[in-house]
Amino acid sequence: PAGLYIVATPIGNLGDLSPRAAEVLARADLIAVEDSRVTAKLLQRIGTKRPMLPYHDHNADRVRPGLIERMARESVALVSDAGTPLISDPGYKLVRDARAAGVTVTTIPGPCAAVAALTLAGLPTDRFLFMGFLPSRQKARADIVAEVAGVRATLIFYESGPRLGATLAALAEGLGDREAAVAREISKTFEECVTERLSALAARYAEAPPKGEIVIVVAPPGEEASVAIDADAALAEALTRLSP
Ligand code: SAM
């Protein structure tokens, strides 16, 4: 039937594509995709070929109205390269506008790296805050980390290998030396989850930046040692030593 179908796809292991997701994709009149090469491979694996339309940050505003029009008559699926669309991926404006236009919106839930990492980390799950990717600029990153330092929840961040060491150091500095987990290559052959204090993780990965896709999970505030350098206190202390 006509409408918008939000379809979660695997984050590494093709076995995680649900039968319902495969059925919806195989029947879709059109699939809105991030990267048609990535989705073409997935469709090939389930033995189907469907028309695809790229939908990403750079063309979304332009193609959205046309997509919404088609949803009134046809079934349009939205997928991202991996995992659940809309989660650090495009789609929320498409859902918003589809709903406003009276289009039926259905979700086919499935893999999401953030939730998968949370299930591996062994950290509290009763409250968590998904933070997506931190900005790479040092000041912007430190500002956001400071903003959430007081939040009584487990924090979840997406990250890439080359930036992991710097991000962990920034988290240790801004949050204190909390327990944290680095989950890597979830559902793939080299799946790994390492749990240590942030400072230890930062040291480990600064030396050897890991390959692959990464989620950082940080424990809520507790009895962590503060590794943040309090500039004012350090200065005051230095001055007392200087004075006769
Ligand atoms: N929409 C996706 C989801 O539902 O998780 C996330 C898309 S985001 C652009 C990609 C990021 O998700 C990666 O940089 C990494 O942080 C995380 N990620 C995706 N697949 C992963 C995997 N198999 N293992 C660990 N992290 C993964």
Image (cartoon, helix red, strand yellow):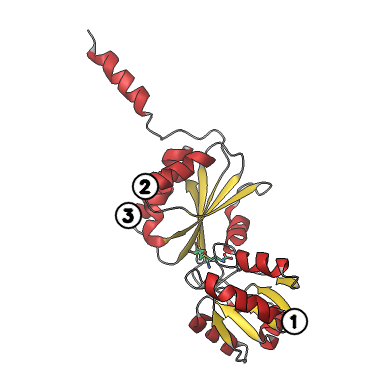
Which percent across, then down, holds residue 52?
57, 85
Q: Is residue 177 visible?
A: no
Q: CA distance from mark 2 to mark 1?
A: 46 Å
- Residue type at mark 1? Ala
144 relative to 25 in the view: left or right: left
Q: Earlier in the sequence, mark 2 or mark 1?
A: 1
Nearer the observer: mark 2 or 3; the answer is 2
Residue 234's place in the image compared with 72, above or below, is above
6 over 161 or under it: above or below: below
Mark 1 or mark 3: name the one nearer the start of the chain: 1
Label 2's element? helix
As drawn, 174 above or below 240: below
Say which residue label 1 marks: 2
**Which element carries disc 1, helix, strand or loop?**
loop
Q: Earlier in the sequence, mark 2 or mark 3?
A: 2
Lateral position of residue 12 relative to residue 94, left or right: left
Seen at 59% across and 46% down, the residue is 154
Query: Residue at (48%, 61%) from the top-left corner?
Result: 214
Beta carbon of the mark 1 residue lies under 8 A of ligand 1: no
**Residue that mark 3 sits on:** 207
Residue 134 horizontal/vertical position (percent): 46, 53
In the image, farthest residue toward the top: 244
Callout 3 crowding tier (Cα within 10 Å): few <14, some 14–19, many ≥20: few
Tell me the quadrant of the picture where the N terminus can be found.
bottom right
Name which residue lies at 49% across and 83% down.
37
Q: Residues within 10 Å of mark 1 (few under 14, many from 20)?
A: some
The residue wearing badge 2 is: 138
Q: Is residue 82 above or below residue 150?
A: below
